[in-house]
Amino acid sequence: MTHNPYAPPESSLENSYTPSSQPVWRKGKMVIMSPGAALPHCCVKCNATLPKPPKPRTLYWHHPLLYLLIFVQIVVYAIVAMIVRKKVSVAAGLCPAHRKRQLLGIALALGGLAGGFWLTASAFSNGQNLLGALGILLIVGGIFGGFLMARVVYAVRIDATEIRLRGFGKAFLDSLPEYPG
């Protein structure tokens, strides 16, 4: 029999890489996973089963010391952060109840922003400085409150060997094995 260079390889694919074969662990309130690993297909807050697989989202991370560049100039920080940031794609799903909470957070942020701008503009145009300051606080509070309610999971550290994430619920964390390291 002659060798056919166009024939498919005859090696076994039994030990080939699949994302679900990579382990995912917990360490306190943090999830540690290998690059390429996939989170279980359940709600990351309450561990409920999901009606459909979650969409992957891109998470970014850079070293926290880069925030000191804001004191130099915010444009310098933005450029350096965009250059050195690391990213990972993670499919973190939410059950319908927690998805509703996330949408409420987004609505809170947008409502605080719109209501705060309206209150600030109308108060300052009528010479009511105290009410204008309250409008500015409404803008800032609505954005930060909505951001915290709408955030699902976030990266604590991303490097070549592991990904560290936070923002998971206790029930989800309890379903994962403890980090061996």
Image: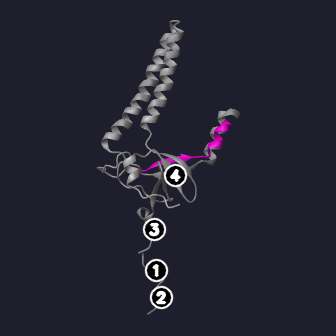
According to the picture, the residue beneath numbered tag 3 turns out to be 17
Q: Is residue 36 above or below residue 101?
A: below
For marks 2 and 4, the one nearer the N-term is: 2
User: Which residue occupies 41% across, 55% down?
Assistant: 39
Q: Amino acid at mark 2?
A: His
Crowd class of label 4 (few under 14; some 14 to 19; many from 20; radius 10 Å): some
Q: CA distance from mark 3 to mark 2?
A: 28 Å
Q: Where are the magenta residues, as a range?
A: 55-69
Q: Nearer the viewer, mark 3 or mark 4?
A: 4
Residue 139's spot in the image, x, y percent? 49, 23
Disc 2 + disc 1, Cβ < 8 Å: no
- Where disc 1 sits, the SS reads loop
138 in the magenta segment: no
Identity of the residue furthest to the right in this view = 72
Q: CA distance from mark 3 to mark 1?
A: 24 Å
Q: Nearer the viewer, residue 5 or 60?
A: 60
* Residue hosting label 2: 3
Numbered tag placed on residue 6 in the rendering: 1
Q: Distance of mark 2 from mark 4, alpha carbons?
A: 48 Å
Residue drawn 46% across the image and 15% down it: 119
* Upstream in sequence: badge 3 or badge 1: 1
Tell me residue 95's x, y (percent): 32, 45
Marks 1 and 4, how far apart at CA: 43 Å
Q: Earlier in the sequence, mark 1 or mark 4?
A: 1
| Mark 4, residue position | 164
Indicate the quadrant where residue 149 lies: top left
Q: Earlier in the sequence, mark 3 or mark 4?
A: 3
Q: Residue at x 44, y 24 (%)?
A: 112
